[in-house]
Image (cartoon, helix red, strand yellow):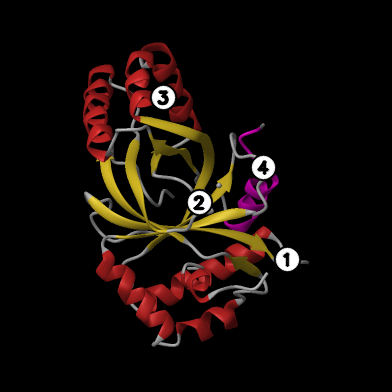
Amino acid sequence: MKVTIPAALVISAGTLFSSSYAGAQEAQQDPSFAAIDAYLCTYRDGKSPDDLMRVAEKWNKWMDKNKSVPYNAWIMHPVLSSTNMPVDVVWLGAWQNGNDMGKGMQDWADEGQGLNAEFQAVIECGEHSQAASVNIRPPAENWPGYNGVAAFSNCTVGEGKTIPDAMAVHGAWAEHLDSIKSKAGMWAFFPGAGQNDIDWDYKIVVSHPDYLSYGADWDNFTNGQGWRKAMELGSGTVVSCDSPRVYHSVTVRNAGINPAPK
């Protein structure tokens, strides 16, 4: 697969566990995975982001009242995307581990169906899926802020290469980001339940605290000749990533999930 410049910029988640997930375990010693919860949705006729935020405020009170397990949540609206990704809004959540995921899902199944109906009156979600997330580069201090920028790119391992080979490339790119004092955080999401007929191995997710950070990394990659470094590391050969979809994110719940657990 030919890698594009925007894709190389972000090179830098049936059953819950796929072969990709198992391969990632070989890429670092005893990695810690967070459990990702994603809804890909469109707004119902006459509904808007303000309607969704009102339900999210009720949900936050429900979470506090029920003393549910720690769960971070973001509402994300596309900023840079195309017609082949017909999504109005993404709800992205994260539990620290699978046990918390199970407890959170059980709480919602037992007590949350009335509130779930309110969500469904505002949005219609064509996909509800899970992923296993491993942190490659910690995000900037004070993550997550109220607003942020998140880029999602689908990545495919090159012929004859392995998931650990690809993770080594991303790890080396993370070191490059260290050298330029980037504020970006980076994760690999390995596909889990709810994702059908995928033609990629995992997603690379890059978070920025703001568009200034996003633009600074873009400029380093292009005018700063970072693309040469990406090619040297194996972008387009060891692993190829497609053009990222970029979202404006709003944090609707911060339960203190550790972005880079040891």
Q: Earlier in the sequence, mark 3 or mark 2?
A: 2
Q: Position of residue 55 (x, y in %)?
A: 26, 27
| Labels 4 & 1 near each other (Cβ < 8 A) | no
Is 24 inside the magenta-drawn segment?
yes
Label annotation for residue 104: 3
Label annotation for residue 85: 2
Residue 118 vs residue 24, the one in the foreground: 118
| Labels 2 & 1 near each other (Cβ < 8 A) | no
SS of the residue at dot 3?
A: helix
| Labels 3 & 4 near each other (Cβ < 8 A) | no
Q: Earlier in the sequence, mark 2 or mark 1?
A: 2
Q: Give the magenta part as a residue range.
A: 15-28
SS of the residue at dot 2?
A: loop
Residue topped by disc 1: 161
Q: State left or right for residue 81 relative to residue 236.
A: left
SS of the residue at dot 4?
A: loop
Inter-mark Cα distance, 3 to 1 = 37 Å
- Confirm whether residue 95 shows in the render: no
Q: Earlier in the sequence, mark 2 or mark 4?
A: 4
Residue kind at label 1, given as amino acid type: Lys
Inter-mark Cα distance, 3 to 4 = 22 Å
| Labels 2 & 4 near each other (Cβ < 8 A) | no
- Confirm whether residue 24 shows in the render: yes
Q: Quadrant of residue 49?
A: top left
Residue kind at label 4, given as amino acid type: Ser
Residue topped by disc 4: 18
Inter-mark Cα distance, 2 to 4 = 24 Å
Q: Position of residue 83 (x, y in %)?
A: 49, 54
